């Protein structure tokens, strides 16, 4: 008998629908983020789709509870995105982050990931199920525009249509949370 090992695939494509969110907690309703420099905004030009565009020189930046001119150790927390992978149902098994180009204090150091099989109400908190809560793989600063440590977990055995990723802690005092890539890995 032979054991066949199947490698994991990247679950998102650059054209997948992705939506920035802020002031959102696990199991809670999603609060949409819009472009700007005020609370609950993502920085113009550093948009949610940059998190899955396969380009390490772009990034997604979200100000969370503050603005571009304020800073705190939690300002970028409870921000992130939800995405619907166009390849269809998938089972998330791992993820990794690529850091932004500047300010390591903005790195996400702990995250949550939830899954949903809803086809309509993705802003409703009850449509999401917690899959992962823990380190982001950026506990130690790997440098700028650098791939962090891949986090692999076996607890998820469900195929989902959608994923919601939230930052729960950031490295230090900053005006936002930022990352160049959020790479979701698993099986179709």
Image: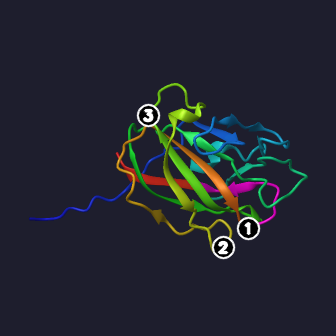
Q: Which residue is mark 2?
A: 141
- Which residue is at 73% across, 47% downward? 46
Cα–Cα gap, marks 2 and 1: 7 Å
Earlier in the chain: of badge 3 and badge 2, it is 3
Q: Which residue is the extreme one toward the top?
A: 120
Residue 65 appears left or right of 30 = right
Closer to us: 24 or 11: 24
Q: Which residue is the extreme one toward the left?
A: 1
Does 157 appear above or below 151? above
- Which residue is at 69% across, 35% downward? 31
Residue 49 appears left or right of 163 = right
Q: Main secondary structure of the magenta part?
A: loop
Circle 1/circle 3 CB separation < 8 Å: no
Disc number placed over residue 44 in the picture, else none: none
Closer to us: 28 or 50: 28
Q: Which residue is mark 1?
A: 104
Cα–Cα gap, marks 3 and 2: 34 Å
Q: Position of residue 45 (x, y in %)?
A: 75, 44
Earlier in the chain: of badge 1 and badge 3, it is 1
Region rendered in magenta = 172-181
Cα–Cα gap, marks 1 and 3: 34 Å
Question: Could you tell me which secondary element the residue under label 2 belongs to?
Answer: loop
Q: Position of residue 32 (x, y in %)?
A: 70, 34
Location of the N terminus (image quadrant): bottom left
Residue 76 appears left or right of 121 = right
- Which residue is at 55% across, 61% downward? 134
- 67 within the magenta span: no
- Which residue is at 77% across, 57% downward? 74
């Amino acid at each position: 008998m032979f054991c066949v090992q199947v490698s994991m695939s990247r679950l998102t494509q650059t054209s997948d629908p992705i939506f920035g969110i802020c002031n959102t907690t696990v199991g809670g309703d999603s609060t949409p983020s819009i472009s700007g420099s005020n609370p609950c905004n993502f920085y113009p030009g550093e948009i949610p789709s940059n998190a899955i565009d396969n380009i390490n020189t772009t990034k997604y930046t979200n100000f969370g509870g503050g603005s571009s001119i304020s800073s705190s150790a939690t300002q970028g927390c409870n921000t992130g995105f939800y995405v619907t992978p166009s390849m269809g149902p998938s089972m998330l098994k791992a993820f990794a982050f690529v850091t932004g180009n500047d300010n390591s204090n903005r790195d996400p150091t702990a995250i949550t990931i939830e899954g949903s099989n809803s086809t309509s109400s993705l802003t409703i908190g009850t449509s999401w199920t917690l899959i992962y809560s823990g380190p982001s793989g950026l506990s130690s600063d790997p440098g700028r525009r650098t791939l962090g440590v891949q986090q692999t977990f076996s607890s998820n055995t469900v195929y989902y249509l959608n994923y919601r990723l939230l930052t729960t802690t950031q490295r230090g005092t900053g005006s936002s949370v930022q990352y160049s890539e959020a790479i979701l890995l698993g099986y179709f």
